[in-house]
Amino acid sequence: MGALVTPLACTSPVAGRNSVRSLAVPSRPYSWGWRAGLPGVGAHALPPPPKATSLQRVNDCGLRASSSTFDKEPCMPISSGAYFLPLSGDLMTCHLFALCFDANDPLRLARFWAGVLGWEMADDPPDGIALLPSDDTGFRIEFFPTQEQKAGQNQMHFDLTSTSLEDQQQTVARSLGLGARHIDIGQRPEEGHVVLADPEGNEFCVIEPGNNFLADCGFIGALACAGSQEVGYFWSEALGWPLVWDQDQETAIRSPRGGPKITWGGPPLMPKTGKNRLHFDIAPPVHGDQQAEIDRLVSLGATRIDIGQGEVSWVVMADPDGHEFCVLTPR
């Protein structure tokens, strides 16, 4: 087994809609960092960050995508009260193994995303299909069968990047040719991002060029999630990925090795309707201990849950916001 725009949302009502601050994070590296509060380790404060001046909006449905008008200036990457600590390999106890889709037709959906992303397909997981990354994404995408129909907007979605307007148009055209469709979630005509849905209705955004927050990311720029500040902190510690944004209850993390960012937009949170259609599979390293990892995750705020999985080798858990994820055996 095994979140929509770019970055993160700090919502406030404006003329019946929501506005959001764009996260044009400077290129200054913050790799191998950690949140404050770990005892017994010498922490040092971050230098004063640049002033946040960019803007981004969030529509009524919660799909967030930056407008090219408002993402030209750098924003504060981490709140001034946060700290970074050096990370050692010992702290990196769990890794993100896969992003998993529940699919009514796993093969069709896998073929769609293989075509969009240019990834190879592999019949690897039991009863599922995997896409193996051809870039620095760092995790696979897996598709598992379900009889449940999609209900409501997903809590997580892809933000795909563009190097030029022509590149953006090509991504949109390729996606439409493979079975995607345009969807209207309240986006304004002047906004540069394009909102699409895959053949099973899973939303994703094709971001216009010039988005500074995703400037150093690959084609999958971000996994944009609905979620609280607390859950951003949880996943930072769970995966050992440093925070690259922490302000106004918005958070983002990124692997020290690069790849996509994972963002959480803060309040107001989207209502959760049933089991999420997308979820993370995480795993301890080859010589790790699954039970020890489960205990650690519980200490960070996760809970074990039963979704009817029966006797299986993985353990189903929920993060502090109640979103499901799975802890696999070491690999």
Image (cartoon, rainbow, N blue to C red):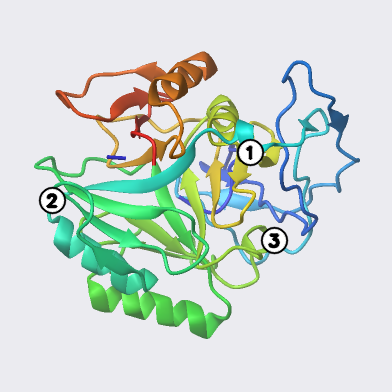
* Residue 71, numbered circle: 3
Regarding mark 3 in the picture, which secondary structure is present there?
Answer: loop
Residue at the spot of label 1: 89
Badge 1 or badge 3: first in the primary sequence:
3
> Separation of disc 1 and disc 3 at Cα?
35 Å
Of circles 3 and 2, the one toward us is 2
Residue 282 point in image, percent of width and height = 41, 38
> Separation of disc 2 and disc 1 at Cα?
39 Å
Residue 51 point in image, percent of width and height = 85, 47
How crowded pointer 3 is (Cα within 10 Å; few <14, some 14-19, many 20+) is rated as many
Identify the residue at image location x=23%, y=55%. 124
What amino acid is found at the position of numbered circle 1 in the picture?
Gly
The answer to whether residue 318 is visible is yes
Q: Is residue 100 above or below residue 228?
A: below
Regarding mark 1 in the picture, which secondary structure is present there?
Answer: helix
Of circles 2 and 1, the one toward us is 1
